[in-house]
Amino acid sequence: MPFHQKKRPRLAPRAKPVPVTSPVPRPSPEAVAPPQAPVQAARPSQEKPSSKSPGRASGKPSGKGPEKQAIPAGDRSAGRSAAKSPAKAPARTREKPVPKPSAAAPRREPRQDRYPSGLTGPVSSRNQPAGAGFAPGGDVLRVIPLGGMQEIGKNLTLFEFGKDMILVDCGLAFPEEDMPGIDIVIPDMGYLLQNRSRIRGVFLTHGHEDHIGSLPWLLKEMDVPVYGLALAVELVRIKLEDRVSGIRNARLIAVEYGDVVQAGAFSVEFIRSSHSIADASLLAIRCPAGIVLHTGDFKIDYTPINGEPIDLARLAEIGNEGVLLLMCESTNVERRGVSISESKVGESFADLFGKAPGRIIVATFSSNVHRMQQVFTAAERYDRKVALVGRSMQNVFRAADSLHYLQIRPGTLIDIQDIDRYRPDQVVIITTGSQGEPLAALTRMAFSEHRMVEIGTGDTVIISATPIPGNEKPIYRVINELFKRGANVIYESLADVHVSGHAYQEELKLMHRLVRPRFFVPSHGEFRHLYQHAQLANRLGMPWESIFLLANGDILELSGDGGRLAGVVPASGVLIDGSGMGDVGNIVLRDRRLLADDGVMAVSLVLQRDSDPLVESMDIQTRGFIYEAEEDRITAECRNRIDSWLHRALAPAHFIPAETLANGLRDMLRDFLFGRTKRRPIILVTIHEA
C-alpha cells in the first residue's frame, strides 16, 4: 500500500491546552491528564472516526475531543503584553497509541477518469484546462497564490472558504536586471482590495523581507489584524515606522508556538520551525474542507542556536489527523542529503577569529539573528569589541535585543564612531552588503566611499552568505576590490562561514513522510524547483493527479471529491519606483532599457512657416550613442536632413500641425541614425512656431 494510504495508530486525547496567550509546556512523561470537554476553535480530536466519517480520506478534522482555545481574529488583547505573563496550565501529555481501528473508512483517491489520461507530470494549467476535474460541491477550499510561485520572493497566498479569506505572508521581491530604476516588486493586490471586507487576518511564517516586505502597502489599503511570532511582529512594526507610511495603530498581534487563532471559518495553529531567522513558524490551517499544512521556509536543524528544534512530533500528530493539502517550500530541492546545522558556522567563526591578526569585518544578512549571535560569541571569546554598520542591521539588532534574543556581555557592543579608540585586533564589525548591493556598507568600504571604515592591509573580511541566484557578478566585483585593498577575504567556497536556512532533499522527504497529505503544492521556488519537488513527491508514492504545479494567480479548488484548477485572478508584480506604486508600466521599462542600451537624441527647433529659411534656430543634443569623434559630423548631417525634410513636407499649400511634423521628423531621424550607427536611440523632437 502506498505511504499516503497507510494509517498510523491514533493517539489518545491530550490534556486541555492552555489559553492562547500562554506558552504551551512540553509533555511530562509522568503527567497523564484525563480528556477534557471540547472548547471553541481547537485542534481536531485524536478519537477513532465513526463509520460515517471519512477520517483521513477527506482530510477533515473530526471536531471532537479536547480542543485549544483560540484567539478571535482581531483581538488585540492577545498581544505581546499578555504573552509576557504566562498563566499556569496543565502539561500537554501523550498516552500510548491505541490500536488501529479495524473499521476505519478507506482512503478515497481522485477518480482517474476525471483527469487527463496518461498524466505523466503534475497537474497545471498546461495540461488541465480551467474548470476540468471534479464538479465542486460541499465544502470547497480555494487556494490562490498571488506571489511566490515560479519565482523567489514576493510570497503571498490567499485561502478562501465561503465568505472568509485569510492571507499567509505578504512579501516583496527585488528587481531583475531588466528592470532599470525599479526599487522593489510587490504582489498585485487588486483581488484583495475587491474582497477586503472578507479578509480575516494575515498570518506570518517569519520576518524575512520576502515574507513581510509588502505589508506597508497592504495595511495602507485595509485594516486587518496581522499575526506572527514576536520577532516577525517587531520587524513589521519597525518597517511601518521607517517608511513613514502614515499607518497608525496597526493591529500587530504577537503569538507563541502552539497558539491557535480563530479567523472566521479558519483556525491557524503556529508550530515551531527552524530557519535562518528566529521565530520561524509552520502553519496548520483548519477549515471545514480539511487541514492545510503550510511550511513557510524551513530546515530540520537538530542543534539550532536557540536550542529549540523544529516540532516534528506535532507534525506527526497533524499527519495522523489527516492533511488535505501540503504546501512546502522548494528552494533547495536540487541539493541532495541534509543541510548543515547553523552551529557549524559558530565553530568556523571561533577558528577564524583566533587566527585573524587585525580587524575583522563580517558581512551577513541583517535578519539572521542567529548568525549575529555567533559573531558576538566568537568576539567575546577573544576579547574583541563589536560595532554594527548599516541601518537594517541596527534595526534588526534593536528588535532582537528588545525581545532578549541576543546574549551579550555589557561593554561588548560599541558605536561605529568609537572603533579608532581600539587596536585593530580588538575590533569586529558586523555589516550589511553580503549581496554586493551598490549602496550597502560593504560595497562602499570596498570602493573607499564609506565615511567611517576604510579597508586596509591586515583586515579580514568574512562574507557569511551565499549569492542570491543571478547576483554573483556584483558580489565577486566587491570581493575583487577587497583583495586589491590588501584584505584577506573569506567566503563560502573557502570556509564553512554560511549554511542554508532551507531544507535539502532528505529533509523534504521527511516532511512528506510525516504529513502524508492527500494533495501537494510545491511552493517558494522557480519553475525548475517546483517541478523537481513535484517529481520527488511522486517518487515517494503520491499520484500525479494529486500534485498541482501552480503559477501566481491560479485558483486551486479542493474538497473531499478531489481538486481542480478553476481559473485565474490578476497576479502580475507591481513595480515600486521611489514612492510611486504601480505607475511604472511596460512602456516606461522599455524606454529605460532603450536609454541604457542605445542612448537618446533631443532635437529642438523654431519653425517659421511663411519665411525663408523655415528653421530660425535648431539645437541637437545627443547622449550615450555617438562617439565624441563622430558627434559633430553626424549632428551636421542631421541638421541638413531636417531642413530638407521640412521644405518637402511644407511645400504643399495645406496646413500640417506641428505634432504631425514632429512625428515625421522622428521617423526620418530614426531610420537615418540606424543606417549610420546601427543603433535606435530614443528621439525627442520639439517644434516651436515663431
Image (tube, grey):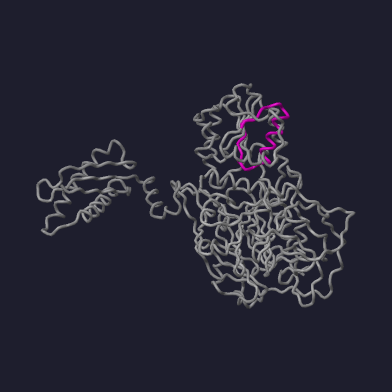
Please report the residue visible at 75 percent of the width from the left and 52 percent of the height from the top: 22
Q: Compared to 6, does 221 lie above or below?
A: above
Residue 287 location, quadrant: bottom right
Q: How many marks?
A: 0
Front residue (pair 369, 266):
266
Q: Which residues are magenta?
A: 361-387
Determine whether, in the image, residue 257 is placed left or right of residue 162. Answer: right
Front residue (pair 582, 100):
582
Residue at the farthest front position: 77
Residue 389 location, quadrant: top right
Q: Compared to 95, does 79 lie above or below?
A: above
Q: Compared to 608, does 486 lie above or below?
A: above
Q: Is residue 204 magenta?
A: no
Tell me the quarter of the image containing the N terminus.
bottom right
Q: Can the viewer see residue 648?
A: yes
Q: Compared to 241, does 29 lie above or below?
A: below
Determine whether, in the image, residue 377 is placed left or right of residue 618. Answer: right
- Image x and y of residue 81, in percent: 69, 47
- Image x and y of residue 9, in percent: 83, 66
Front residue (pair 149, 368):
368
- Image x and y of residue 322, in percent: 74, 66
Residue 72 location, quadrant: bottom right
Q: Can the viewer see residue 504?
A: no
- Image x and y of residue 395, in percent: 59, 40
Q: Is residue 374 magenta?
A: yes
